[in-house]
Amino acid sequence: MFDLFSRRHAEKTGKPEVFIYDSFTKEFRNQFYAIVKDVFTPLNSCNSFSYWESICEHFAREKGLKNIVYRSQYDNYINNQVAFEFYVDTCSDVDFLDLMDYVFFIINHPNVRKQAMHHVLKDICQDAIEELNVRLKQHSLGYEFCNGQIVKKTNTVTHETIIKPALYLLCDEVFRGAEEEYMLAWEHFKKGENKDAIVNAEKAFESTMKIICTKLKYPFDKDRDDAKKLLDILKNHGFFQNYLESHLNALLTTLTSGAPTVRNRTSGHGQGDEVKDIHDCYTAYVMNLVASNIVLLYSLYKENI
């Protein structure tokens, strides 16, 4: 089963936003339909089944609908492409968001992308993803298709300068383990599981340093060395440039009293009789702190290899 966007995200009301989240204009819906059509039309021409039919059938099932098909007033012929177009034009904003999330999950699926490259000889799926993100930005819509799903951009500066670069850098195959831990941290955060989010964020941070030490052949104890020890190892091996020494001394203090200490003091030990709640803003701070330092470490790693 597919985990629809509306199930993954509980909307919070009453908070000012810099993006539009709850209004998809006719112009944007038309552009969305055109983007999808550019992918499904050539794929349908080289397949024995219809992508329009598959999308309509499976999306209706996920939404708990009998169907979203459209019957012509002149005959009984069911045209799934027309049904899709009609649904795009008339569905609610919440339903449209679910549809967009689901359709681009399909477009980004490895089997679909492989088939598209084989038959069309160009990456029409990637073109569609890139255009969707451009259109979302053009319409000031606070969403982006990233890492296989529609994500909500809650803060444009943080998203563009910290979170997004960290996710893209961690897509490097070498850092796949750190990527999985960081993405898991966000999944916990979205579910309100803040302690688990902090634990996995620090795991991602530590994994990034362990991977760097492994690749650069810096000896370390993979079972015992924590974030502070790993930072010391990197520094002692000259991983940091001399002109960054004063800055990184301050950074080491920030890191060792930031993400790792938050984990140790709030999530890594027993909580006694009282259940400790960690505020979202505090958890987001840790997530952003970890992401910004992952970007820094990755950039320095690329200079050292």
Image: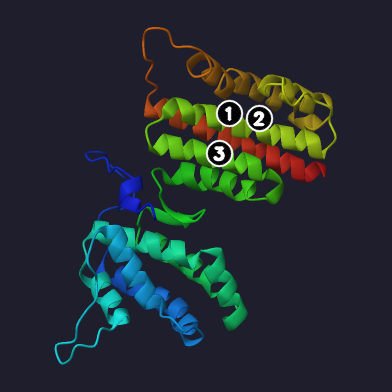
- Tell me which numbered mark, 3 or 1, is placed earlier along the sequence: 3
Binning the other alpha carbons within 10 Å of mark 2 as few (below 14), some (14 to 19) or many (20 upward) gives many
Binning the other alpha carbons within 10 Å of mark 1 as few (below 14), some (14 to 19) or many (20 upward) gives many
- Tell me which numbered mark, 3 or 2, is placed earlier along the sequence: 3
Taking depth in this image into account, of 132 and 88 the one nearest to the observer is: 88
Percent coordinates x, y for residue 108 in the rendering: 51, 64
Taking depth in this image into account, of 222 and 34 the one nearest to the observer is: 222
The three-letter amino acid code for the residue at tag 3 is: Tyr
The three-letter amino acid code for the residue at tag 1 is: Glu
Residue 250 seen in this snapshot: yes
Say the numbered circle drawn on residue 43: none
Residue 133 seen in this snapshot: no
Percent coordinates x, y for residue 231 in the rendering: 72, 25
Q: From the image, tell me which residue sits under label 2.
A: 206
Discs 3, 2 touching: Cβ within 8 Å: no
Residue at 75% over, 22% down: 232
The CA distance from mark 3 to mark 2 is 11 Å
The quadrant in which the N terminus is found is bottom left
Q: Secondary structure at mark 2?
A: helix
Q: Secondary structure at mark 1?
A: helix
Discs 2, 1 touching: Cβ within 8 Å: yes
Taking depth in this image into account, of 104 and 295 the one nearest to the observer is: 104
Q: Secondary structure at mark 3?
A: helix
Residue at 38% over, 36% down: 191
Q: From the image, tell me which residue sits under label 1.
A: 202
Residue at 56% over, 24% down: 259
Q: From the image, tell me which residue sits under label 3.
A: 182
The residue furthest bottom is 74
